[in-house]
Image (spheres, helix red, strand yellow):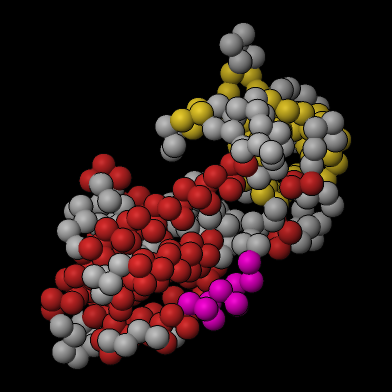
Amino acid sequence: MKYIKDLKEGDRVFDIYLCKHKQSAVTKNGKAYDNVILQDKTGTIDAKIWDPNSAGIAEFDSLDYIEVYGDVNSFQGSLQISVKRVRLCQEGEYDPADYLPVSAKNIDDMYKELLGFIGRVENQYLRKLLETFFVEDEAFMKAFRSSSAAKTVHHGFVGGLLEHTLSVTRLCEYYCAAYPLLKKDLLITAAICHDIGKTRELSSFPDNDYTDEGQLIGHIVIGVEMLDEAIRTIPDFPVRLANELKHCIIAHHGELEYGSPKKPALAEAVALNLADNADAKMQTLTEIFKGKTGTDWLGFNRLFDSNLRRTSGA
């Protein structure tokens, strides 16, 4: 099998891929075609079926495994496949593990490092709260280790939530060393817990889509509800500390228009927002430039509100 990350312009493909998404569309001339996103564990690639009603194109839907025959070409700086034939595959023809995008980093090693941060939290209430989720709750631990951090924008792969959380926690540890006014135990706990609601906001792979709870409530509110429920099980948990922690979670998107019910009012909430935003944007750039060569401009990007290109090698 030739993985998506290894494809290049001019290649001819004849392999099995997961259809992550399928949508019918119409050209400017009124001709029907299908937009398809193909996926394997190394990433995704856009594909076009220009003649969906031809005899060589079998019926299939999103999340089906399909054998694709077609040519790889380039369009506006990105690779895509022009599909000639499609065959719907049956169970046993493929290994699902080959089609789930997975963090390039070792999940066990990342989780061990995260547990190290938890072990260094000195405040007994915050450490107990963290242990309630990350040491004692087997179902949560399994979901957290396998969840993505987002549907499409950044860290959209198995282990993505863990990788993002660990990166944010590392940044927050640096902030604590650089800015002594920050309460380290509070900030580290907030960093580790800031996206726990995503374990319920997003469904598991291969779907990795918003759940009904995620659509209606969102991960920020879900996360605060999860924290509040756990805090109630810890005797004498200080009310003020609980409110400060919940504020950091509520405010970690930074702005009301970005989904936070409150803007940051504590130094730790400001630091968490900066760390979360920095890691999300740098990972997004990493994924945008992945597989791109040269310094051609890639076009306007809504997240960055700018045209983007790679830095030259000079």
Instruction: Decide which of 297, 203 is in the foreground and name it.
Output: 297
| Residue at figure coordinates x 26%, y 42% from the top left | 257
Q: Quadrant of residue 76?
A: top right
Q: Is residue 187 left or right of residue 55?
A: left
- Indicate whether residue 113 is drawn in magenta: yes
Quarter of the image for the C terminus: give it: top right
Give coordinates of residue 18: x percent, y percent: 69, 49
| Residue at figure coordinates x 49%, y 32% from the top left | 301
Outermost residue, top direction?
Answer: 29
| Residue at figure coordinates x 41%, y 82% from the top left | 118
Q: Is residue 233 left or right of residue 40?
A: left
The secondary structure making up most of the magenta span is: helix
Give coordinates of residue 147: x percent, y percent: 51, 64
Give coordinates of residue 90: x percent, y percent: 77, 53
Instruction: Decide which of 34, 170 is in the foreground and name it.
Output: 170
Give coordinates of residue 113: x percent, y percent: 52, 78
Outermost residue, front direction?
Answer: 314
Q: Quadrant of residue 12?
A: top right
Q: Which residues are magenta?
A: 105-114
Instruction: Decide which of 104, 91 is in the foreground and name it.
Output: 104
Instruction: Decide which of 117, 24 is in the foreground and name it.
Output: 117
Q: Is residue 61 visible?
A: no
Q: Is residue 247 above or below residue 10?
A: below
Q: Is residue 101 visible?
A: yes
| Residue at figure coordinates x 31%, y 61% from the top left | 271
Number of marks: 0
Q: Is residue 35 left or right of residue 67?
A: left
